[in-house]
Amino acid sequence: MSTLVTVRQTTTTTTSTTTAINTNNNMTTTNGQISMHSYGITPPITMKGPDPSDIIATDDLEESLRSYDYFESDAELALRVDVMSKLDGLVQKWIRDVSIAKNIPIETADTVTGRVHTFGSYRLGVHSKGGDIDTLLIAPRHIDRTDFFTTFIEV
């Protein structure tokens, strides 16, 4: 089943057919025009899928990585998810405590929150077994980096 999507930024090229194309929900065809969603500043080099030889090479690479015990087990993955959940809980408690210490009313301190975002290899799903989790903490304006480096360690 093909899905037509609404695009915010499009790159348009003329084609001779009128068909709906669904490649990861980022291409549509209307009246011979292909509209492609671009997730960055520049469009992708190609939207062509993998050749059969690419799929075979990928399978061979995955088999080789498995033989070196490169991939995490389900238990290790669950531990990462648990660690991120606990980190988020610590961050929320810390933000509340710092807010109160900065004379923010308790009613307001109970509503302000921060966010912990992941990035890097973990976010892309290409991290190795035992690899780190790159994180970014986004906190309310009244909390600065000095607060983080002096008081978060106490939490």
Image (tube, helix red, strand yellow):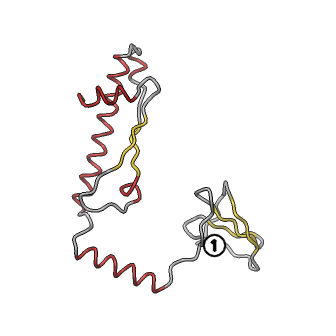
**In terms of secondary structure, where does tag 1 sit?**
loop
Q: How many marks?
A: 1
Please, what is the three-letter code of the amino acid marked with disc 1? Answer: Ile
Q: Quadrant of residue 64?
A: bottom left
Percent from the top left, x then y, of residue 8?
67, 54
Query: What residue would you read off at disc 1?
Result: 21
Give me the residue at 38% from left, 60% from top. 125
Q: Quadrant of the C terminus?
A: top left
Q: Quadrant of the N terminus?
A: bottom right
Percent from the top left, x then y, of residue 101?
34, 16
Give me the residue at 73% from left, 70% from top. 13
Q: Quadrant of residue 77?
A: bottom left
Give me the residue at 63% from left, 63% from top. 43
Q: Quadrant of residue 73?
A: bottom left
Residue 42 placement, left or right of 115: right
Pick whichever, 134 or 90, lies toward us.
134
Give me the residue at 62% from left, 56% from top. 41
